[in-house]
Image (cartoon, rainbow, N blue to C red):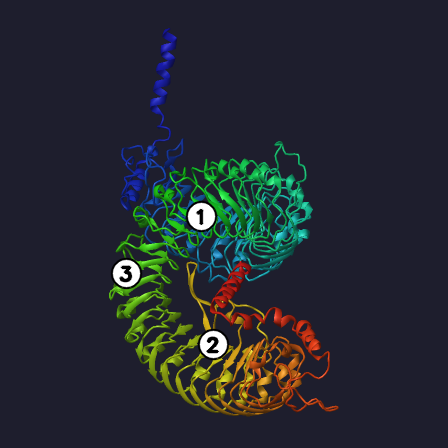
Amino acid sequence: MAAILFVLFTILLIWDAAPSRGACLESERKALLQFKHGLFDPENRLFSWHGYDCCTWRGIACDNQTGDVTSIDLHNPYPDVLNPFPNSTDGFWNLSGFIDPSLLELKSLKSLDLSYNSFGGIRVPEFIGSIKLLTYLNLSNAGFSGTIPAQLGNLSSLQYLDLSSWETLLSVDNFQWISRLSSLTHLAMDSVDLSVIGPQWIHSIGRLSSLTELHMHSCGLSGIAQSLPVVNFTKLSVVDLSMNNFNSTIPGWFLNLSSLIHMDVGGAGLHGFIPVELSNLHNLRYLDLSMNMNLTADCSMLLSGGWRRIEYLSLMGNQVFGNLPVSVGNFTSLVWLNIAYNNLEGGIPNSIGKLCNLKILSLTGNNLTLELPQFLESSACISQYPLPSLYSLELDYNQLTGVLPEWLGEIRNLQALFLNGNSIQGPIPPSIGNLSLLVALALAENNLNGTLSPTIGQLSKLKHFDVSSNQLTGIVSEAHFSKLSDLEYFSIFSNSLVINVSSNWVPPFQVQELRLGSSEVGPQFPAWLQNQTRLQQLDISNASISDSIPSWFWDLSSNLYLLNLSFNQIKGQLPNLISITPYAQLDMKSNLLSGSLPTLSNVVEILDLSDNQFSGPISPDIGLMQPYLIYLSLSSNNLSGEIPTSIGNMLGLHVLDLSRNNLDGVIPGNLHNLTYLMALDLQTNSLSGTIPPSIGSLQRLQSLHLSNNRLSEALPSSLQNCSYLEMLDLGDNFLDGSIPIWLTSKLPALIVLRLRSNMFSGRIPPQLSNLSSLQVVDLADNDLEGHIPPSFGDFKGMSRTQMVNKYLHFGHYRACYYEEQLTVNLNNNELVFTKTLSLLTSIDLSRNKLSGTFPQTLTKLVGLLVLDLSHNHLIGDIPEDISAMRNLISLDLSNNSFSGGIPSTMTGMSFLSHLNLSNNNFSGRIPEAGQFSTFDSSSFSGNGDLCGFPLALQCQQTDGDNNSMPDGSDDYDGDGVLEDKWLIVSVCAGFSVGLLGLFAVISIRKQWRVAYFKVVDAFISETAR
């Protein structure tokens, strides 16, 4: 026992005599306290920095033998603005201040990490380059700025360097120092400005033979060497050069990076062909070539080789072409395949069924045209279901056809299915209801038909459901929503579905966005909306609602960012004050709402109350209460009073439409403040005075309608400043003076010029033909005189057939826009063109005092559809080659003094459906072939020397003379003449009677015209989808 005690006593003596292991050195403790003194620590994260043993302080590590400080780790573990772990004792960590040079006293310091702090733009201290033993330095995203000191190149032992700077600007003006870091294995300089270095950066990096990771994302690099004298990157396994601007092809030395595992050169300004040899990098697991825009490759060749270990492959946003090959099924390690927004064609091979590990497949925005495979190739996957790992399938915005295959409903882990924007037909398979994990289902903008299966109601995790713009029919009942408790977005607009739920139904969801437009929701206002307290966007337009809006609805509206109740028959008055969320869109056009205009509780961006029955004045303070309006339409109501001058305060206004009301007074002069205005429509009111010169300040204006008012005097010369004008409609006023010459050169974009029914005088400027885009010239019913300018044959916009329908609309914002329309007089009837306006070409010079002859040059206008020269003083013959105007559907030369025969060549004008040559001095036989067999006598009456069908006056027959003279007989010569004429009528009327003859038919009654053009517009809208 005594011996044991003696041994223990000896050990204690020896222990006490030896120095303490790992005890902090006093000099270094003081150095750390001096360093702490320079820091600002608002959260007191350094509370443990007291006492004698600094090795126990938070973030400090020491050598176990000597007690020397070897590591300082003060990185912010929670760099987010909001603490993700509010109950954590770590809380925030956000140091700032300055870095004290006392760190130089730490002679054994090997690791320094100050990342993700906020040092407020101070420079990286030069003295850090004197901490000789540093092997690890991380100053990333710590708020440093300025030039990185070249002294860091003295850290010859450094292995890890991260100077990435996402928020503040760090830069390098000399990169040679980096080549002295011969031991470096990890270099990260993401978002450091290296733009002044030029393409020489790679030569400095190339000397780092030990480098394994290189991160230089978004560094402003420009240029990259295509080859290197010596490739020292044999150990390089991770390369990130994304978001630079190399403007180069893929360098050849990339192909020699045999150790490469991860390469990201997305958005790096690369172009040219993607080398197929990249597939020889057999260790590659991650490859991102996305968003280079001009990289190209044949997909079938690119994916035919190696890459058996590839897990992530992104070629998104390039020019990859060809087919997705069957060999893609051999890439069994694939987890993520993204070839979206390229030029892929063909279809999707059924070999994708072998990709057991695939989680995301994105082929969005290509030109895939084939059907989805009806069966997938069997695989060695453990699961009995196809694609067992897939959770996102993105095939939207292609041209896929066929029907939805049943295997879609068997991908049991699928969470997102995007097939919108294709041409898929047939029903939605009920098996979709088996996808119990599905969160997003997007099948919009296809040709799907049939009914909506109630199995959709079993998707208990579904948040996003969109089948809009299809051809679905049938009932949507409560069963379709039975388990959709997580639903946030529900869109079925532009189908033919009927919402049929009980009046006391309480939905299981709290939806945020609800789009039911063009579904049958009414006639009652849907009571089940009452509990939708999270609703932010509501579209129940064109929903057959003929009810009034219940008072409880206005309790919901205060949260609405979008409210669209348009195209119903909602009646009654709106509350004096409507609660709405700030900057909302409120669209209630085309209803039966009456009373005075409401006041809104907040500023909005879009307000459309057009085509209702509102009456009374517009609030004088509307511009003060709604200064942020971008779109304002109050057209087609019964509003009275003056246009408020406060509208001049709506500085961001794009569209102002107050047309078709009973407004009087003058056009406010302060509209010049509306410098963003693109469409101004004040037509069909009782406005008087002049057109204010201030309109010339609206230099973004594209459409101006002031017709059918009481405006007078000459056009203001300031209007020539509106150089973007495409539509100028000033008809039906009391404007006078001559047509200004500046109009022919200062408005180069003009498509429509409508000055009819005014008091313009003088000659027509021949320079009008300089307006190369002009398609409609309507100068009718003025006091113009002189000859028709021969230069009118030079209108480029009428010299060719308009084959492409360009839907003319202006001020597009948040799916809202001003729809251009124009009233055209055709056959003494008014036709309103909207969606088909861009196809119209017309010249109307009728009801003036024009003299002279029919200009021969007009026959060059082969694209002209409508020509009206009636009610003038024109003389001479119709040119023989008028038949060159082969697309004319309406020609009116009536009430002039034309003479001579009607050219027989006109029978070849097969589209001509309206012809009026009455009240002239034409003579001879009326041609009988072609469209002439369809015209009645009113087309030729008032020409005493004309004869032949359809006039009662018959022509004398003379051998070999086609220009027979009238014989005064009412009898037909020959038994079969009448039968022959009606055979011509029935057979030769042809195409134009079947289609373009509609213009003659619909001119009989206004209701027919309105109905016809609504059908045409609806068809154009549908086909434009």
Q: Where is residue 873 in the image (x, y as percent from the top left)?
A: 50, 91
Mark 3 against mark 2, which lies toward the viewer?
A: 3
Is residue 801 toward the left or the right of residue 61 in the image? right
List the residue tagged with mark 1. Answer: 162
Front-lying residue, 43 or 636: 636
| As drawn, 875 above or below 381 | below
Q: Can residue 749 be seen in this view?
A: no
Amino acid found under the numbered disc labelled 2: Val
Q: In which quarter of the image is residue 976?
A: bottom right
Q: Answer with mark 1 or mark 2, whichever residue precedes in sequence.
A: 1
Quadrant showing the N terminus: top left
Q: How crowded is mark 3: few (under 14 residues within 10 Å), some or many (20 or more)?
A: some
Farthest residue in the top direction? Answer: 1
Q: Distance between the residues labelled 3 and 2?
A: 35 Å
Front-lying residue, 970 or 892: 970
Which secondary structure, mark 3? loop
Is residue 937 toward the left or the right of residue 666 in the image? right
List the residue tagged with mark 2. Answer: 752
Q: Is residue 980 visible?
A: yes
Residue located 53% across and 47% down the image: 473
Asked whether disc 3 touches disc 2, contact meaning CB atoms under 8 Å apart, the reply is: no
Q: Position of residue 89 (x, y in %)?
A: 32, 34
Q: How far apart are marks 3 and 1 (CA)?
A: 66 Å
Farthest residue in the right direction? Answer: 959
The mark found on residue 596 in the picture is: 3
